[in-house]
Image (cartoon, grey):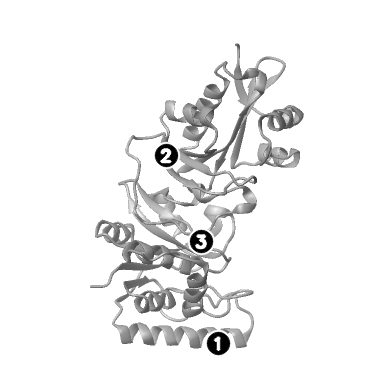
Amino acid sequence: MNVRIRAALVTDIDALVAIENAAFATDRISRRSFRLLIERDTASVLAADEGGGLMGYCVVLYRRGSGVARLYSIAVSPGSNGHGVGKALLEAAEDAAFDKDRLILRLEVREDNPRAITLYEKNGYRPIGKEPDYYEDGATALRFEKMLRGDVPFATTVPYYEQSEEFTCGPACLLMAKAAFQPGFVPDAVMEVRLWREATTIFMMSGPGGCEPFGLAVAAYEHGLAPEIIVSFFGALFLQSVRSDEKRRVMELAQVDFRNRVDAYGVPVEYRNFVLDDIRRALAGGRLVMVLVSGFIMFGKKVPHWVLAIGDDGNHIILHDPWVEDERGETETDAASIPIPYSIFMAMAQYGREGLRAAVILGRRQ
């Protein structure tokens, strides 16, 4: 069959919806979602065109600043099965991800879809996990990935944990570190909120407060880890955008308490800008690093955000990002073990007009 893979157009939406409804009984992409995906600069919607009719499509998603792409959906019209359309779309998805400088293409597939699983396995995808009750009907998803550049996938024993609240990125990173260094510990939302209560600045720009490096280091120490702090600014943090004098006063008092306890515990503190070699050296020594970043590069919001550096492949810092943008169709696949090029990592690892840099290095307690 003479199949041409091209970018889908808004005028293809009727055909895309027809393929979607014929291929899937649940978890269908809506007409509105197809339009949004076609118009997004962080997605590629590709159509298999036989010259007058569409035989299938695929959608690839790209998280900003990441070395990972995700095959969000792929479908072939029932009458076109067995003609190599799925393979052609998969190869086109890989090419699109490669052209966007992505290192890895990841995907989810239903555990009860042997046809699709065989396609992925034959084309070099390796299993990386499973997610029970992932689909609307309760079916389990299998996760696969393929290296598009190089041939050595990054392996980690650091479990991934998604933050359950907008303000708990720091505690979620602490949970992942505890699970890595303390065998048998299982993260959960109760401990996540407890750690937030123990490390929070109490207030933030609006709503519940986030966590600054000293509070996180205190919580890490009190929960059996060995923290070190590198921070570029001496004094209370995150006060610039807080307009209420009373809130500022309470935040300053909370942070004075954290600094006093850091001193009492003997936690090492360096007041300077960290450099890439600081992060790489800590990771090479078997430690993990909580890094303050601006959320703008990764998900378009100018907010302070904590991520956990878990590895270094010689060109990229590998991150677990506890934030998953559910409203944009993201899953754990998009946020776990993300390779970030060194230059992008250092560009995002600062916050605010002053370019605040902060890192909390975490290791096992001796």
Q: Amino acid at mark 1?
A: Val
Structural crowding at the residue carrying mark 3, measured as other residues with C-alpha within 10 Å and reported as few (<14), some (14–19) or many (≥20): many
Q: Residue furthest top?
A: 1
Task: Using residue 154 as the reference point, say whether residue 57 is left or right of it.
Answer: right
Structural crowding at the residue carrying mark 1, measured as other residues with C-alpha within 10 Å and reported as few (<14), some (14–19) or many (≥20): some
- SS at circle 3: strand
Which labelled disc corresponds to residue 337? none
Q: Indicate whether 143 appears above or below 344.
A: above
Which residue in the structure is indicated by mark 1? 250
Q: Quadrant of residue 365?
A: bottom left
Q: Residue at x 36, y 63 (%)?
A: 289
Q: Indicate whether 156 appears above or below 149.
A: below
Which residue in the structure is indicated by mark 3? 294
Of badges 1 and 2, the one in the foreground is 2
**Image quadrant occupied by the C terminus:** bottom left
Q: Indicate whether 58 appears above or below 328.
A: above
Q: Residue 359 in the image: x percent, y percent?
A: 38, 67
Q: Residue 29 in the image: x percent, y percent?
A: 69, 39
Of badges 2 and 3, the one in the foreground is 2
Q: Quadrant of residue 20?
A: top right
Which labelled disc corresponds to residue 127? 2
Q: Amino acid at mark 2?
A: Pro
- State the residue in front, 281 or 311: 311
CA separation in Å, label 2 and label 3: 32 Å
Structural crowding at the residue carrying mark 2, measured as other residues with C-alpha within 10 Å and reported as few (<14), some (14–19) or many (≥20): some
